[in-house]
């Protein structure tokens, strides 16, 4: 059996009965239920439809998200999440670069790296080098004045933890940011790269090795699940960049959230309109089961 999930952006809540009924008839679906009226609904189907991609594209053009996944083992025991442009609304290195006066140059490299056009390792070294000489104190200033949490993130983490899941923030960014962000949202653990500073209290332009990139995210998924007697099939992973693709494809449920085109095209599930609470709807949680952070 498969489960069809239909979702609208919570700010619009414009998912209607006619859309659900039309798709039920098209795919010989069973009884539908509202997870959150106007925002999320689901129904079972016996087989995977051949026209999923065509239907997804049509709904996407109407501002709706569609996912079709096996019904079994939908509710996951582990959450792995990217940070930049996923759990927060910014790319931290771009914000530091803006303060350093090299914002456009670094942002252009970031965009190409996240779209898979550049080697992540080399692109990170190049961008960090441009931050050399920036006072350490700027990191706290950026965290305070520029970093905002992505909608639905704290609710996602709080709800999964309340239901016994382990949550991990796994980022190609920096521990100076993942530490505070993970603590603020409530993640159980965090992994990221380390920005190195000199004795003068300024960034050295170097990052600690080895760099946490695509392969390290895969390793994190395998290690974190194995440590709990689980497998990657028991995890849901979310990210937006090319360095997230490996873990998105290996996890039981891999979600590309407002992702770069190359990532969305290859990810098992894509959410283009909803926020991070879509990951709860994908697991069958109803709004009445959400836990306030």
Image (cartoon, rainbow, N blue to C red):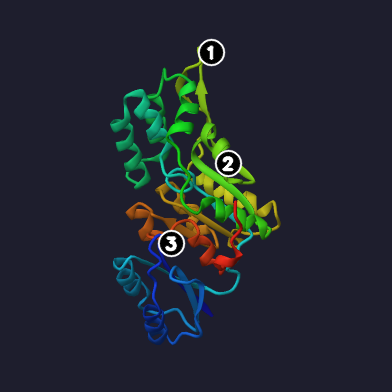
The first of marks 1 and 2 along the sequence is 2
Graded by Cα atoms within 10 Å as few (under 14), some (14 to 19) or many (20 or more), the crowding at tag 2 reads: few
The first of marks 3 and 2 along the sequence is 3
Q: Which residue is at a point 50% across and 59% down the rendered structure image?
A: 277
Q: Which residue is at a point 58% across and 51% down the rendered structure image?
A: 221
Name the element at disc 2. Answer: helix
Q: Which residue is at a point 50% across and 27% down the rendered structure image?
A: 140
The first of marks 1 and 3 along the sequence is 3
> Is residue 188 left or right of 268 when viewed as pictured?
right
Residue underneath mark 1:
199
Q: Position of residue 51 (x, y in %)?
A: 35, 77
Q: Which mark is residue 10?
A: 3
Residue underneath mark 2:
184
Name the element at disc 1. Answer: loop
Q: CA distance from mark 3 to mark 2?
A: 23 Å
Name the element at disc 3. Answer: loop
Graded by Cα atoms within 10 Å as few (under 14), some (14 to 19) or many (20 or more), the crowding at tag 1 reads: few
Graded by Cα atoms within 10 Å as few (under 14), some (14 to 19) or many (20 or more), the crowding at tag 3 reads: some
Residues at discs 3 and 2 in contact (Cβ within 8 Å): no
Q: Nearer the viewer, residue 16 or 259?
A: 16
Q: Quadrant of the N terminus?
A: bottom right
- Disc tally is 3
Q: Which mark is residue 36?
A: none
Q: Position of residue 246 (x, y in %)?
A: 47, 53
Q: Quadrant of residue 228?
A: bottom right
């Amino acid at each position: 059996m498969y489960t069809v999930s239909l979702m609208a952006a919570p700010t619009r809540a414009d998912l209607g009965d006619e859309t659900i009924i039309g798709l039920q008839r098209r795919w010989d679906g069973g009884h539908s239920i509202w997870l959150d009226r106007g925002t999320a609904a689901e129904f079972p189907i016996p087989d995977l439809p051949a026209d999923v991609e065509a239907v997804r594209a049509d709904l996407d053009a109407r501002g709706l998200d569609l996912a079709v996944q096996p019904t079994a083992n939908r509710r996951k025991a582990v959450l792995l999440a990217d940070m930049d442009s996923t759990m927060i609304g910014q790319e931290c290195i771009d914000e530091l670069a803006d303060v350093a006066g090299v914002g456009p140059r670094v942002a252009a490299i970031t965009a190409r790296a996240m779209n898979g056009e550049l080697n992540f390792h080399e692109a990170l070294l190049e961008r960090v080098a441009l931050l050399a000489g920036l006072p350490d104190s700027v990191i706290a200033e950026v965290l305070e004045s520029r970093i905002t949490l992505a909608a639905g993130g704290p609710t996602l983490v709080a709800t999964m933890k309340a239901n016994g899941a382990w949550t991990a923030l796994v980022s190609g960014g920096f521990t100076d940011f993942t530490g505070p962000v993970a603590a603020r949202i409530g993640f159980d653990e965090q992994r990221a790269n380390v920005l190195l500073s000199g004795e003068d209290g300024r960034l050295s332009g170097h990052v600690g090795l080895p760099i946490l990139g695509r392969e390290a995210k895969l390793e994190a998924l395998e290690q974190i699940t194995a440590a709990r007697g689980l497998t990657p099939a028991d995890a849901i992973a979310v990210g937006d960049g090319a360095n997230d693709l490996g873990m998105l494809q290996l996890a039981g449920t891999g979600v590309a959230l407002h992702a770069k085109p190359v990532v969305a095209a290859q990810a098992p599930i894509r959410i283009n309109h909803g926020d991070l609470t879509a990951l709860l709807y994908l697991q069958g949680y109803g709004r009445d089961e959400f836990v306030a952070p």
